[in-house]
Image: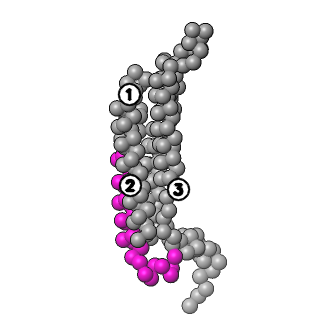
Amino acid sequence: MSDPGPVRQQLTNLLGAYGYNLYDDKNRMRADDLLVRGQAAAALGEATNALRDLRAAYRRQFIPPPSREQPYPPADRMAQLDAMARLQERAADLETRIRNMAVPPTDRVWARFRDEARLLGDLLLHDYALIAPAMALRDQALALTPDAWSPAAASALNQEAAQLEAGIRARQTFLQA
């Protein structure tokens, strides 16, 4: 048998990525999982930006500059601004949590005890469940205007955020099992 030569050996190592096969189903599932979480996180990033812009527009439209007659802004308007800020922070926190979610490591020892392809497939389904509420939150935030802002709008946004948090907890619980 002939020696494959250093060039062929290097090419084999590059295609196999030194032990990581790009075309293996499990590795593609890991990449798909990352893409799905990226979509959900991107939608939340857009929602965060929309809420920031909404706060700025609300402040320009409803918070008058201080005057001698009214040195402090109206308390009810400031409460609305605070509610927008809390929602913005919540959306940003959810984005960070989704981007930093754990994925089971590639470990040859654990591969003997678990069906990694099934585990990654189930994990991918959990991540797909995050996309719909993230996009709904984004769409609702983008549709809001300063005139349309109300406690009901804040409640609807908080419901979508709660649904996302429930999905994140379900995914964490699944990984702990």
Please report the bounds of the magenta region as a residue range. Answer: 107-134
Query: Sequence-wise, which precedes: disc 1 or disc 2?
Result: 1
Indicate the amino acid at tag 2.
Answer: Gly
Q: x and y percent of residue 30 in the render?
A: 46, 64
* Residue placed most toward the observer, 73 or 100: 73
Label 2, label 3: how far apart the Cα atoms are: 14 Å
Q: Is residue 1 above or below residue 107?
A: below
At label 1, counting other C-alpha atoms closer than 10 Å, the crowd grade (few under 14, some 14-19, many 20 or more) is few
In the picture, the disc for residue 100 is 3
- Name the residue at 51% across, 25% down: 78
Quadrant of the image containing the C terminus: bottom left
Q: x and y percent of residue 160 in the render?
A: 37, 43
Query: Sequence-wise, which precedes: disc 3 or disc 1?
Result: 3
* Residue placed most toward the observer, 35 or 119: 119
In the picture, the disc for residue 167 is 2
Label 3, label 1: how far apart the Cα atoms are: 32 Å
Q: Nearer the viewer, mark 1 or mark 2?
A: 1
Q: Nearer the viewer, mark 2 or mark 3?
A: 2
Q: Which residue is mark 1?
A: 150
Q: Does residue 135 show up?
A: no
Kindly check if marks 3 and 1 are in contact, taking CB atoms under 8 A apart as contact. no
Query: Sequence-wise, which precedes: disc 2 or disc 3?
Result: 3
- Name the residue at 37% across, 24% down: 148
Judge from the rendering whether residue 50 lies leftward or rightward of residue 125; answer left or right. Answer: right
In the picture, the disc for residue 164 is none
Q: Is residue 79 above or below residue 94?
A: above
Q: Secondary structure at mark 1?
A: loop
Q: Nearer the viewer, mark 3 or mark 1?
A: 1
Label 1, label 2: how far apart the Cα atoms are: 26 Å
